[in-house]
Structures are given as C-alpha cells and as structure tokens.
Image: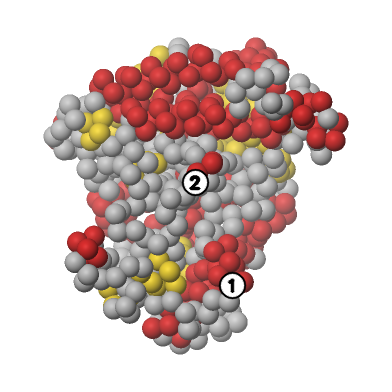
Amino acid sequence: MTSWHELAENDGRLSEWTYPIQYDQEQVVDTDVLVIGGGIAGCWAAISAARTKGLRVTLMEKAATIRSGAGGPGGDHWDNPMTSPFSNHDPDEWCQHLIDQMGGYCCGIGREIQCRESYDAFLEIEKMGGKIRDTDDEYVGVEGRDEKTKLIVASRYKPDKASLRFWGTTFKPALKKECERLGVRIYDRIMGTSLLNENGIQGARVVGATGINSRTGKFMIFKAKATVLCTAGVGSIWVFNTELAGISTFRSRNASGDGTVMAWKAGAELTMMEKSGLLMLGTGYKHKIDSGGTDPVFENVPMVDDNGKAITYAVATREAVLKGEVALPFYGDFPAMSEGWRKINWDLGYNEESTCLAMRRVFKAAGYDPAKDLLPNYALIEGATPAHFRSPDSMNHRGGVVVDWNLKTTLDGLYAAGEQMYGPLAHSYAASTGRYAGRKAADYALKADPPAVSKDQIALEKERVYAPIRRKNGIEWKELHAGIARTMQYFCSEFKTEKLLNMGLDALNDIEQKWVPQLYALDPHKLMRSLEDLSILTFSKIIIHGSLARRASSRHLNFFRIDYPEYDPPEWNKFITLKLKDDQVKVGELPLAYWGNLKENYEAHNKDYKGVKGD
C-alpha cells in the first residue's frame, strides 16, 4: 500500500507547501533583552523591559502572539490581588497562607510578587485597552459588583481572597498592541530550541537562544544580553491517543515543556520535577461541563439528578447511584439560579474563559437557553481518570526552574516567569511575575557585556534540529509521542519503586537511542512537532530522575514510593533540585522557605518600585 508520504513526495499537488522552504538558512537577531514565549507572562515581560529607555527588546513566540498561551483566548478571574480595596488581608500574610496550603511546596517568591503586584498589573492593563469593569452596566445588582468602581468580585472565591472578574478575551490583543507601541520586535511562529551559553560552556551565562520557524524551516539565532523564559508548561507526558481520545490533554499540544528542557540543557537548576497528579480534564474519555461549584467559571451552579433531585458531589456517590438514591445523568440547574448569577456565569464566565468559549458556542448554536434548559454534566462518578493517566499536576504547581528574588535562574543572564517557574499558578500570577521579571532583566541588560556566542554550539544545535528532515522515512512524531506516554504510564505512574523507575529510564533511553534516529518530518510544521517530542522525551527523563531522587512519599507532591511509604518524614521536607553538568545529572536540595522573610526580602529587592494608583 502506498503511504501518504509517498503520495506527497510523488504528487506535486499534494507536496505543495504554502510558505517558502528555507531549511539551513540563518537569520541573526541582535537584542538587549530576549523574551522566549509570548503568552501572558511573556507579553508582560517584554512590555516591562521595553519601558527601560534605550533597550532593544525582542519577543519570540511559537504560535501567534495575538492569541497564544493558556490565557490567550481569554480568562475570567484574577487571583490574589491583595492590594485591591476589596481585600481585607495583608499581602504578606496571605502569601504565607498560600504557601502553607501547599505544604511549602510552591514558589514563595512568585506568590509574594503576585500578592503584592497583581492588582497593579490589573489596573495597568486597563490603560492598555483590557476590560476590567462592567462599564456597560450589564451586571448591575449582581452580587459582587461594586457600584462605585464597577469592578466585580468573583464571589465563589471568598471575599478575603478578593479575586476579580475580567473580560479575558480583551487582554491578549491589548498586550500585543502595547508591545508594538513600545517597539518590541515580535517574531511569531518561532519555536525556541536551545539556549546559548557564553562561549558554548554549559552552566555559563546565557547569551541568547536558537529557534526554528515552523512555517519556513528557517534557523533563527538570537543574541541577547539578558533572556527571560516565559514558555508554557507541559501537558501530555502520560497520555497521548489521537485515534481514540483526541489529543488527550487539557493543554495545547504546543505546551511541550520546551523552555524547561532548554534551561536544563543549558545547566539551570530545576525543582519539584517529581510532582504529578491525576489528569482531571481533557482525557477524551469523559466529556465534562462543570457545575456544582467544581470550577471557578461556573460559580454556584446547583446540580440535580435525572429526577430533578437537588444533589451535591458529596452525596452523588457510586453507592448512592447503585442504591437508587440518585439517578444518572446529572445536570447543572441553570434555570434555578437567579437571573443575575445565571447571566454572570453564562455571558461573562462562559464567554470570556478561554477553555469554555468554544463549548458555549456549540450549545448556543444548538438552541440551548440557560433560563430554561438544564446543562448535562458528564462528570462520571467513578472518578476523573485512571491513576496512570497523569499530568505534571494539571495546570498549576508543577516543577520548573529555580529562581531567586530577581526571578533570575541559577544561570547568569537567564530569568523566568509564569509557568516557566516551579510551582506556578494562573493568569494573574503569570502577569505579575512576567511584569516583574521583565524589569529585573532590563536592569541586568543595562550593565551586561555584549553576548559572546559559540559558533560550534550553534552548529551542533542546527545539526540536531534538522536531523528529522534529512531522512526520507522512519517514524513520525505521533508514534514517538505515543511511545513516550506509554512508557511513563507503565513505569512512572501512581505507585513508584526504584526498580520501576529505573526500568522506565532504561526504556526512555532505548527510545532515544533506537527510535529518535528514525524520526523524520515531511514539512516545517511536522519538524516542529518532532522537536516538541524530543522536549517531551527529555522532560520525561527529568521527571524520573526527580522521582528517583526523592526517597520518601509526599502527600503535598502527590508522590508515592512503595519502597519508601512514609509520608513527608521531616528530613525529606525540602526541595529536591536537579541540574545537568557534563551530561551527568546532579542532585541537590534547597530548604523549604529558602526565600527567607517574604516582606523584608521583597522590599529589599524592590526599593524603587512604585505601585499603580487606582480605585
């Protein structure tokens, strides 16, 4: 049987590519501050850096900056703006509360920045054109709306958290426009492939990055005095099944851990890489539209069973269904809500939250009326997913690069923000840390020496990047990805032992040695997907190294070792760190709360910072 690729190569009509093929061609970009990743954190970092007069700022984005990233399509709630007039908590005290909720396993520095500065960022984006207020008086009288300021408190989050509603679909276009106004050079459709170390020495100062254009295949070389990593996390390590369940992840396929892997290969220190959790959304096997207060978008939506009986998840158990006490299917009872709450959920939450807008359109097109119709809830009572369908803790709180109070990594010249950091959070966290990292990187760039890149390092990376397009046959990116996911399911699942983890590492090494040399790509887009697989492969190996290094179980990390069953023994209450040196994995540790006094250290590192005045 003739394969698709044989047809494509032999039939001119099929092999046409819309863009010019520019494999091996190079473009060199000189800049002062390079931002890698044009999502929420990346745009804010670029804007913040560009406000420093005389600095050239460049933004590299894998997709299109106008809508890229997890927050690109929208969002609806702004977490932890603790300096807002609606907050009744001290920012430093609330930050410590957030840290304690995670058992200490989160980035206290990032949380402090969020609590201190996220309201400033919220007010600032309004000046750029983002909508944060009910200026059209659509929600007058709705609980949480402040009649004076027209700001809306997201009241599913208790008033002491003071999370605020916003019109998320307006934010990303406003950020891109501000980048352009400030003269940021934006390079869209460029996948970052490696960081450049000074003189090509691993662990030395970062002096730029390389990338590949996913439409033309052109090789990009960025030289920079300071670099800010703002790429997304990773979403499809354990689960990938395009045939039976779609992409099988809540996250975009673009979220392949590229930035973390780039930092790792450059010699940066990582932590919390052993953490994972059940994949709660996007498995493809259970299609869920949340209600009953299970998601911040759908606040206070009551739930009923098939007989109209009011229920909660606490009573809608498997046993209750089998006994006939409740009847499947379950529904979100939108008609039972007040008109104001129904409107704020359906018209603001659904319409502005990035993950729900498409669902709203489908239901609306089918004639769904939230004032009259129940909304099916397919949250099956057996649980979210099988235990081996895992994720690096869904969206938030996963591992990443270690940072200090300047959001500088352990490598000179390299900063991080948003999901790139370990233990990240959501939209306002990305915005506030990106904004912060941008100004710190700008300060560094003002004093830094010109970058000294290595031609040999660039040549080696170019050879690695183009290897899949040099081949005429072999395996494609989907096959490689599926093999990696199956390996992680088998050997690094819910229950772990040293033997299982080492078997998994051996299997991943076998994939790298046997199958990666057979990986081939037919066009620049498939080349990008192939390179993403290589990131996923390396990311998976790092997860196993982190899992081997932690010889204790931990509830806070959702981490269980059968051979070390004691949960959170005192001597293991610490961050396990990993870094690559001379192709060897080096294991270290950091104490929990290594950041010291939150208030004192924040203020010591931000003496010249002036907040944003507003309501």
The spot of residue 400 in percent (x, y) is 42, 36
Q: Quadrant of the N terminus?
A: top right
The spot of residue 241 in percent (x, y) is 49, 39
Query: In the rendered image, which residue does mark 2 sit on?
Result: 245
Please indicate, yes or no, whether residue 9 appears anywhere in the rendered image: yes
Compared to residue 394, the image places residue 135 above or below, namely below
Going by the image, does 427 lie left or right of 57?
left
Compared to residue 516, the image places residue 432 above or below, namely below
Q: Secondary structure at mark 2?
A: helix
- At 65% from the left edge and 66% from the top edge, which residue is drawn? 129
Compared to residue 455, the image places residue 358 above or below, namely below
Please indicate, yes or no, whether residue 590 appears anywhere in the rendered image: no
- At 50% from the left edge and 18% from the top edge, which residue is drawn? 512
Nearest the viewer among 160 and 524 is 524
Compared to residue 524, the image places residue 170 above or below, namely below
Q: Residue furthest front?
A: 1
Query: In the rendered image, which residue does mark 1 sit on?
Result: 366
Q: How much space separates mark 2 and mark 1, taking CA atoms?
A: 23 Å
- At 32% from the left edge and 19% from the top edge, which residue is drawn? 502
Question: Which numbered disc flags the more N-terminal residue, 2 or 1?
Answer: 2
What label sits on residue 307 in the rendered view? none
- Residue type pointed to by label 2: Ala
